[in-house]
Image (tube, coloured by chain):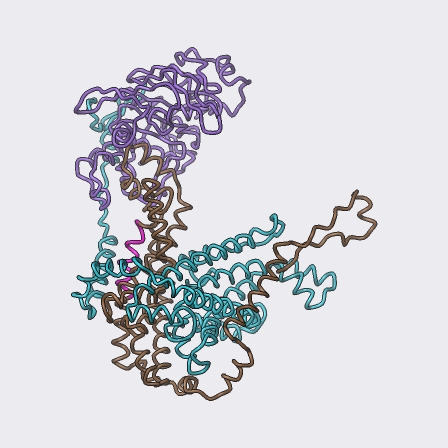
């Protein structure tokens, strides 16, 4: 760039400048010395830690030679799956997917029904501290156990059928729904409750008019979201025999019946996406209210997940 | 569903002053149909799954090996070297899956967003890819990879990589909606390329959230990797499957207890780290 | 040199923000554009670097590409690499500063070098020494180099805008566009920023176009004032010719107190944003017009 020299000078005469005294100039130059570049130790440490962890992780007993053939194998399987699907398997698959959806739904409903009264036991503003702490720990434990493992433990109890699946989903969801419930209870706006007391409402009426209107939309929205999450869990429960499309899926894949496995995969993916879409719309409709007549604090469960991931424990939320 | 439409219940005297009474609004069609729908759907599903509360109660009252195993919990599993070794494997799987999958999720989330995609075709491709990946449960990934590369730790790692892509890209996409577009405009005005703009104007804004998501992702991966072993993809799940097959229920529950301990400890650490990030 | 010929901009929805504009700005001029909100100031400025495309007419921009000497670009129809290269020759300063708050001042200024730095270097954050040197010099020119490694969010408004100016300078541009650069700043800081722009224009010969809605600032600093109303040019003349009547004409209404920035005190001096962002109390007795840098 052809421009006059831009080397910084100690003086900056400005518009109507008279040069400053030499002392001022020296002072000025010192003031403007470039700072040293900071060490950025933190960045290097973090990079080293991450790479170190990666190396440690990869040091597990991995059969690397299998990886080499993986990509051609993957393409081969893709080809086998979709070149000539076995459409005759479709009715059976749809039936099984329907069973998975039913399992997820019923499990979520059961969990909601059970979680609501239980959550009262966990609300600090309603019961003594030891009780609430205990109940919360129960919720935490139930949240932490994956549904599939619950299914494994429940099969000897309920048998190799869909009932086991429902129970596994239900028990797994009680934890997160319960957590949301007690947080809602603790955060309740006492206004409407006082108001219903003031007009002399009975206990149930107070619940109906003071509590429910505030709570229902959030709860319903969250339960729907849980349903969406549970679809994914219930789809695979069949792998251990607890009903649903998982049984067929694992059979077709293990025995490499690819022309049916591909179809099964597509059924699962499409059903999940469709359920997500419908449930998502219903949720948004719930939260928005009919023509916006409902006034409430809205909680978008997906935002909750993000909030849970960002600043946990302060927000009600659920691991996906 | 609550019906919040209460009107027309005021005393006659006051309404005379305010003019014509409005017609009472019809009860929310939406709320009503939702309530009906929920009940109907529930009944349908009860039939479909052959579910009965009576049956459940009956099952629970019968003695069975699983609950007996729970009562005779094998606490020694918590310090059992074999269990611990399997656990180390589980953690290794989770670590690799989080790092590689989480790393890959960043560009995928960027390309699936309006501001981060260089053009419409890339955005559409990334969005479709993300949608498909997010619709596949972790166990299903494991099943597929076991079929492709055999049992062991490798399919577990591969499955967790894709699972991590799903989780992290979803969360990252959400925060992308809320970024400050100012620096983006500044980069464009200075003549930067698209990738440079992403790196200098967008990534620094989402970095703390992104790292927080990676930690959260690791928690989820840890839970998931315990389960993947049930289909042969390594880690603690394979041990559970082994004991289950041998009907050694005290051991099964013992391992579950060990799993709970590790998960809860990791969750506490993760919570602590995440708080300091945001 | 910038030349609009019969230029028009009509936004989708029918809003016409520029109507058949004919305007030539010579190299090295200091031009201030005034007009009400919605009069088309922002559109005009953003048309120069193509952020807002013309829907009619033509726009020629002449730049001095260091090695290649002077080149004239037709902005209409420019895209891809060519558009980015043109934008690299034009620095832009924003009302909201548009800095990346989470990162250092230096990294923000280095964004001005993006067009010339290889992408892989940008990804890793490894800028060449020569570019870092240019960035440092730009910071020195706006007298804020001591804050080079400070997080941008920790600076006051005036300091952030200086970083914005440094970022534009780092591009080594032929033209600088400033869209309401002082609208968010207090009077003393606003004058300081305008002085920097003026110095840069006079010492480096960079064509400078500034949008302002403070009329007293316009008359104080502009060589040439352009008045827009409803997307049309209604005034074009030296700053000295612009008096209240002229402004009333441009605005189409009588003037209010909001149209004037106000005094920055009888001794126009220090930007005074060292100790306190709002400049109270730390006046340095200096000559009129010399921005003295806080420590």
Is C262 on the left-hand or right-hand side of C197? right
Residue at 32%, 82% (x, y): give it: B243
Is A96 on the left-hand or right-hand side of A66? right
Any magenta on residue C84?
no
Is A262 on the left-hand or right-hand side of A224? left
Residue at 43%, 35% (x, y): give it: C278
**If the image is split into quadrants, where does the N terminus of chain A sit?**
top left
Indicate whether A91 appears above or below A240: above
Q: Quadrant of residue C290?
A: top left
Magenta-colored span: B94-107
Q: Position of residue C222 (x, y in %)?
A: 38, 18
Tell me if I can see residue A124 in this picture.
no
Q: Position of residue C139 (x, y in %)?
A: 27, 33
Q: Which chain is purple?
A: C
Indicate whether A312 appears above or below C78: below
Q: Which chain is cyan?
A: A
Q: Main secondary structure of the magenta part?
A: helix
């Amino acid at each position: 760039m052809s421009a006059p020299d831009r080397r910084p000078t100690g003086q900056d005469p400005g518009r109507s400048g008279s040069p400053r005294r030499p002392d001022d100039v020296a002072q000025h130059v010192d003031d403007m010395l470039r700072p040293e570049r900071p060490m950025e130790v933190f960045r290097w440490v973090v990079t080293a830690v991450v790479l170190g962890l990666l190396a440690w992780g990869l040091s597990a007993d991995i059969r690397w030679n299998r990886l080499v053939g993986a990509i051609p194998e993957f393409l081969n399987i893709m080809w086998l799956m979709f070149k000539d699907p076995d459409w005759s398997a479709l009715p059976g698959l749809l039936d099984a997917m329907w069973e998975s959806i039913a399992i997820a739904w019923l499990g979520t409903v059961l969990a909601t029904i059970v979680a609501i009264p239980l959550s009262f036991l966990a609300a600090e503003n309603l019961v003594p501290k030891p009780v609430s702490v205990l109940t919360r720990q129960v919720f935490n434990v139930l949240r932490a156990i994956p549904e599939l493992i619950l299914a494994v433990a429940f099969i000897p109890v309920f048998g190799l059928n869909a009932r086991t699946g429902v129970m596994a989903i239900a028990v797994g969801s009680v934890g997160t729904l319960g957590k949301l419930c007690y947080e809602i209870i603790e955060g309740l706006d006492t206004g409407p409750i006082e108001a219903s007391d003031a007009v002399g409402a009975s206990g149930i009426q107070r619940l109906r008019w003071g509590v429910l209107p505030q709570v229902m939309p959030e709860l319903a929205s969250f339960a729907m979201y849980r349903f969406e999450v549970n679809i994914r869990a219930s789809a695979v429960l069949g792998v251990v025999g607890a009903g649903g499309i998982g049984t067929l899926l694992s059979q077709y894949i293990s025995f490499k019946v690819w022309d049916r496995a591909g179809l099964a995969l597509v059924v699962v993916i499409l059903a999940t996406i469709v359920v997500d879409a419908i449930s998502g719309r219903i949720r948004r409709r719930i939260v928005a209210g009919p023509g916006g007549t409902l006034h409430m604090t809205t909680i978008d469960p997906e935002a909750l997940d993000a909030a849970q991931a960002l600043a946990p424990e302060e927000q009600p939320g659920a691991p996906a | 569903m609550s019906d919040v439409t209460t009107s027309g219940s005021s005393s006659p005297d006051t309404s005379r002053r305010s003019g014509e009474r409005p017609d009472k609004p019809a009860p929310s069609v939406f709320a009503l149909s939702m309530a009906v729908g929920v009940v109907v759907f529930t009944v349908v599903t009860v039939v479909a799954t052959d579910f009965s509360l009576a049956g459940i109660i009956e099952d629970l009252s019968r003695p069975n090996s699983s609950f007996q195993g729970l009562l005779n919990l094998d606490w020694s599993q918590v310090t059992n070297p074999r269990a611990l070794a399997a656990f180390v494997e589980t953690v290794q799987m989770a670590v690799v899956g989080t790092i590689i999958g989480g790393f890959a999720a960043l560009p995928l989330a960027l390309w699936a967003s309006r501001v981060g995609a260089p053009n419409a075709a890339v955005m559409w491709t990334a969005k479709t890819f993300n949608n498909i990946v997010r619709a596949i449960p972790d166990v299903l990934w494991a099943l597929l990879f076991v079929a492709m590369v055999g049992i062991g730790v490798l399919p577990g790692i591969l499955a967790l990589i894709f699972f991590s892509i799903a989780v992290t890209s979803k969360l990252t996409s959400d925060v992308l909606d809320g970024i400050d577009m100012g620096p983006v405009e500044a980069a464009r005005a200075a003549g930067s390329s698209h990738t440079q703009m992403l790196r200098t104007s967008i990534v620094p804004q989402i970095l703390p959230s992104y790292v927080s998501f990676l930690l959260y992702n690791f928690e989820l991966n840890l839970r998931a990797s315990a389960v993947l072993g049930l289909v042969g993809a390594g880690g603690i799940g394979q041990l559970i499957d082994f004991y289950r097959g041998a009907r050694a229920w005290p051991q099964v529950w013992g391992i579950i207890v060990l799993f709970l301990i590790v998960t809860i400890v990791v969750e506490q650490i993760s919570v602590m780290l995440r708080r300091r990030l945001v | 040199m910038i030349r609009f010929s019969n230029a028009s901009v009509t936004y989708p929805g029918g809003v016409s923000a520029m109507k058949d504009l004919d305007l030539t700005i010579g190299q090295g001029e200091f031009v201030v554009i005034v007009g009400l909100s919605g009069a088309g100031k922002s559109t005009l400025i953003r048309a120069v670097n193509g952020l807002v495309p013309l829907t009619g007419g033509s726009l020629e921009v002449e730049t001095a590409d260091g090695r290649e000497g002077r080149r004239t670009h037709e902005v209409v129809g420019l895209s891809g690499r060519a558009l980015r290269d043109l934008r690299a020759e034009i620095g832009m300063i924003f009302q909201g500063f548009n800095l990346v708050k989470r990162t250092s001042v230096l990294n923000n200024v280095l964004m001005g070098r993006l067009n010339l730095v290889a992408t892989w270097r940008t990804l890793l954050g490894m800028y060449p020494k020569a570019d870092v040197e240019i960035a440092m010099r730009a910071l020195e020119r706006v007298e804020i180099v001591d804050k080079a490694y400070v997080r941008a969010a920790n600076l006051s408004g005036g300091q952030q805008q200086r970083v914005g100016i440094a970022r534009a300078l780092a591009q080594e541009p032929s033209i600088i566009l400033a869209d309401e650069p002082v609208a968010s700043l207090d009077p003393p800081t606003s004058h300081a920023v305008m002085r920097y722009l003026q110095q840069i224009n006079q010492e480096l010969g960079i064509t400078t176009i500034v949008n302002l809605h403070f009329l007293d600032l316009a008359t104080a600093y502009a060589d040439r004032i352009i008045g827009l109303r409803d997307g049309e040019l209604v005034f074009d003349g030296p700053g000295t010719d612009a008096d209240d009547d002229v402004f009333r004409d441009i605005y189409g209404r009588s003037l209010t107190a909001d149209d004037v920035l106000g005094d920055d005190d009888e001794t126009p001096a220090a930007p005074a944003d060292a100790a306190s962002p709002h400049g109270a109390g730390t006046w340095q007795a200096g000559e009129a017009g010399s921005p003295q840098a806080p420590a």
